Image (cartoon, rainbow, N blue to C red):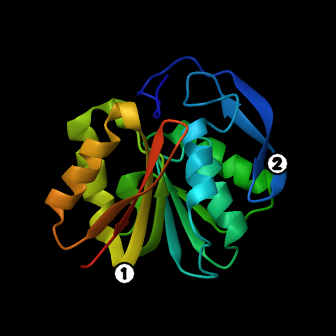
Amino acid sequence: MNHYFAPGDGDWRTREITVSLAGRELVVETASGMFSPEHVDTGTRVLLDTVPALPDSGILLDIGCGWGAIALSMALEAPGATVWAVDVTDRTLALTGRNAERAGVTNIRVAHPDNVPADIRFHTIWSNPPIRVGKAELHAILETWIPRLEVGGEAWLVVAKQLGADSLQRWIAERWPTAHVERVTTDKGFRVLRCVWAG
């Protein structure tokens, strides 16, 4: 089971599930073959239960949006903000877009990473990053997005302890020595990391 669809994946059977996000019950569309098609996965739930309240406005980012659990939560909690939901295939982006429409959410922008304007800086990133793509690819993803935080902006990441959360925390601290990175909580086998960008 992948965080991302690989190009050309043929297993695409959609289904509807009911989920609770940002205090609302939503019916969303998911698909077989993608990450956590039957429910909000444990790591994402731990993240959503840990992060602080969002600002009323600003530009927010969900890296690896899948069917949209994190992006929808951000958009519902901060209706005056713009939420960018990025993923690597058109199919996952289409799912997030449809789920936003069904929820009556109008402040989500779905995009392939290459289509996010280069001058945009983010106030907050929430992500359950795709650990299983491998360390090099994961690091490349974070190197794309973390430096695009505004000064004082925060990235909140949830990572399974057994899949390298502690080593990822060390790598972030070594890669960006001026950034502040800390482990905020450990719950149900997951670590939530907070990285504050210093510019």
Label 1 crowd bin: few (<14), some (14–19), many (20+), radius 10 Å: some
Residue at the spot of label 1: 152
**In the image, 30: left or right of 176?**
right
Q: Answer above or below: position of 167 versus 117.
A: above
Q: Is residue 57 left or right of residue 23?
A: left
Does residue 121 appear in the picture of this structure? no
Q: Residues within 10 Å of mark 2 (few under 14, many from 20)?
A: some
Residue under the image location 58 percent in, 72 percent down: 82
From the top left corner, tell me how far across and down residue 47 is, in percent: 55, 52
Q: Which residue type does callout 1 highlight?
A: Gly
Read off the residue under disc 2. 26
Disc number lying in front (1 or 2): 1
Q: Position of residue 167 (x, y in %)?
A: 24, 43
Q: Which is more N-terminal, label 2 or label 1?
A: 2
Q: CA distance from mark 1 to mark 2?
A: 32 Å
Q: Secondary structure at mark 1?
A: strand
Name the residue at 74% across, 59% down. 22
Which one is nearer the viewer's eye here, 154 or 146?
A: 154
Q: Position of residue 45 (x, y in %)?
A: 62, 46
Is 36 in front, or is 105? 36
Residue 57 falls in image quadrant: bottom right
Q: Secondary structure at mark 2?
A: strand
Q: Residue at x 85, y 50 (%)?
A: 25
Instruction: Tell me what residue is drawn at x 20 percent, y 39 percent.
Output: 136
Q: Quadrant of the C terminus?
A: bottom left
Q: Can you tell which quarter of the image residue 6 is in?
A: top left
Say above or below: 51 vs 48: below
